[in-house]
Image (tube, grey):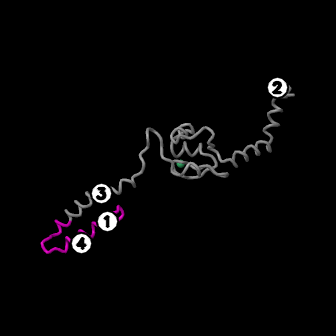
Amino acid sequence: MTKPDSKTELLSTIVASYAARPDVDSDDIVALVAKLSRELKIEEGAPTDAPIAPVSGTMTPAIPLSRAVTEDKVFCLCCGKGFKMLKRHLGAEHGMTEAEYRAAFGLPEEMPLVAPSYSRRKANYARKVGFGRYSRETVRRDGEIVR
Ligand SMILES: [Zn+2]
């Protein structure tokens, strides 16, 4: 039996013994190599090594879903790069919206596309610069009392 990873080795062995024959010229060797390569599928590679073809509009993630979100980064499943938020990257690099991205990889709605730590920092920042206070002041200027 021939293991897939030894095909090239097998081919060179056959060709070497063939070439050692006195009645063989270079054209015969070239023809033999071509024939063997074809039959051993060396040029095409082993069928099991071929990338998995996308199934009806879905894409194969570049990294495992289980590693797509960390505390500080969310990783793009198209290219495997990590970002604080994916939205801009998806549009700029892949021409996708978040919805298209979710659909392409079959992501659940609860899967964050913004790093958890970044969401929290933004919320903290908003509180710190007083977005909450600003909105209350706006309400008061309009003459409507909140509480
Ligand atoms: Zn990407």
Magenta segment, prevailing SS (helix, strand or loop): helix
Q: Nearer the viewer, residue 9 or 24?
A: 9
Q: Position of residue 90 (x, y in %)?
A: 55, 44
**Which residue, given by chain and number where applicable, does mark 3 sit on?**
41
Above or below: residue 14 compared with residue 143: below
Magenta stretch, residue numbers: 1-29
**Which residue, given by chain and number where applicable, does mark 1 sit on?**
8
**Which residue, given by chain and number where applicable, does mark 2 sit on?**
142
Q: Which amino acid type corresponds to the residue marked 3 in the rendered image? A: Lys
Q: CA distance from mark 2 to mark 4?
A: 92 Å
| Dot placed on the residue nearer the N-terminal end, 4 or 3 | 4
Query: In the picture, which quadrant includes the N terminus?
Result: bottom left
Q: CA distance from mark 4 to mark 1?
A: 12 Å
Q: Of tags 3 and 2, which is closer to the observer?
A: 3
Above or below: residue 41 compared with residue 95: below
> Could you classify mark 1 by the number of other residues whose Cα lies within 10 Å: few (under 14), some (14-19), or many (20 or more)?
some
Q: Which amino acid type corresponds to the residue marked 2 in the rendered image? A: Asp
> Could you classify mark 2 by the number of other residues whose Cα lies within 10 Å: few (under 14), some (14-19), or many (20 or more)?
few
**Which residue, given by chain and number where applicable, does mark 4 sit on?**
16
User: Does residue 9 appear left or right of residue 71 in this picture?
Assistant: left
Q: CA distance from mark 4 to mark 3?
A: 19 Å
> Could you classify mark 4 by the number of other residues whose Cα lies within 10 Å: few (under 14), some (14-19), or many (20 or more)?
few
Q: Find numbered disc 4 in the image and state the secondary structure of the residue it sits on.
A: helix
